[in-house]
Amino acid sequence: MAEASQETERTGHARFTYRLRVSSTAQTKLLGEWDRCRWIWNECTARSKKARAEDEKCGPARLDRMLTEARNRNTWLGDGSSVPQQQLVRDFGKSRTKALKDIQARLPMRQRAGPSSVRIYRDSLGHWYASFVVATEAQPFPDTGAVIGIDWGVRETATTTSDAHDLPHAEHGKKAAVRLAHYQRMMARRKPAKGKPGSRGYRTAKRLTAKLHKKTARQRRDTGLKWAKSVVRDYDALAVEDFRPKFLAKSTMARKAADAAIAATKTALITMARKHGRIVHLVHPAHTTMDCARCGARTKHALPPSERTYTCTACGAVSPRDKNSAHVMLVRAGLNPAGADRGRPAGPPGRQAA
């Protein structure tokens, strides 16, 4: 096993992921489990479509009966473990129209102390991983008595009330764009005809593309985790913009926003804070660029993205736009009493992360 990584899932639990070096026999068994799970997923899809066409319900109970009948009727299906098959039926019930994009199978665990669950999956490079969920204890950092406000953006991934903890845009995707375009052109030139297997050159180019995508994702994750730990180490309470970057996917900033990995960095920050006993206040993002952190006044019109300086028409305060928004986070979360006394509450109050 190698390439271990840790991710806190919820309070008191953490997920550890390890790279598996599987033998040919083990890989054959794992692929067999996937083939069974894929057959069940396709059968659930067919049953669901048929039920909709006939205006009937196809709920979890009906799918469970289908699975039981199929295992009794089909020896090949019955030879596999029932745990991943039952879990797949539950997953289908939660999301009937979502495609199963990654190759994964949930394998049973013996009833014993230790991991509460395990997931075996394979990535786009064909590497196998085992992901365990285990109970953990909090590892609190010493109290510092300091608080910080954090605003997410595209020019800079995170702007904070502390200049030393701003997170600049690393542009990992931009740096890999030239090589990625080269590999994609290799794939385009060697693309096989429909229904025919790809050539060795096509498979090589496809693997290089997947490898580069994975490297970029790891770089983004590493940058986010290192920054999150430095913030959590130095501050007891965090006022974090509860920003949902999904709408940026349809804007002209979509590529840069995706490269900034705001959602992944935000998740890493909340995870790290939970692990080390810090308090996180998630602040509603509405009007954060229109409010003055000093007096609480709100501008009549939203600032265009090109306007990077905030000027308050009420008190005359002038500050960088993102820095003002970061201070607004503190005011809304109640972590800046002086600013909160002078200004009215703007938007929903901050809520603590679960």
Image: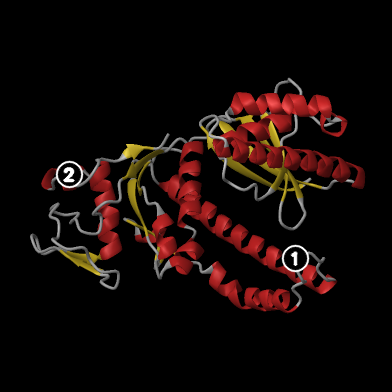
**Amino acid type of disc 2?**
Pro
The label nearer to you, 2 versus 1, is 1
Q: Which mark is residue 345?
A: 2
**Amino acid type of disc 1?**
Arg
List the single residue furthest toward the right.
25
* Residue on which disc 1 sits: 207
For residue 224, side relative to residue 111 (left or right): left
List the single residue furthest toward the left.
314
Question: Which residue lies at the image location 49% right of the left edge and 55% below the top edge?
Answer: 227
**Dot 1: element:** helix
| Up-down relation of residue 331 to residue 76 (above or below) | below
| Callout 2–callout 1 Cβ contact below 8 Å | no
For residue 11, side relative to residue 164 (left or right): right
Question: Which residue lies at the image location 70% right of the left edge and 64% below the top edge?
Answer: 211
Number of marks in the image?
Answer: 2
Question: Which residue lies at the image location 65% right of the left edge and 50% below the top edge?
Answer: 101
Way the structure is coloured = secondary structure
- Is residue 120 in sight in this rendering? no
Classify residue 70 by image quadrant.
Answer: top right
Label 2 to label 1: alpha-carbon separation = 52 Å
Classify residue 212 by image quadrant.
Answer: bottom right
Please provide percent x and percent y for residue 209: 69, 68
Quadrant including the C terminus: top left
Question: Which residue lies at the image location 75% right of the left edge and 40% below the top edge?
Answer: 39
Pointer 2 or 1: first along the chain: 1
Please provide percent x and percent y for residue 184: 67, 74
Quadrant including the N terminus: top right
**Dot 2: element:** loop
Please provide percent x and percent y for residue 72: 81, 24
- Is residue 139 in sight in this rendering? yes
For residue 200, side relative to residue 215 (left or right): right
Label 1: how many Cα within 10 Å (few below 14, some 14–19, many 20+): some
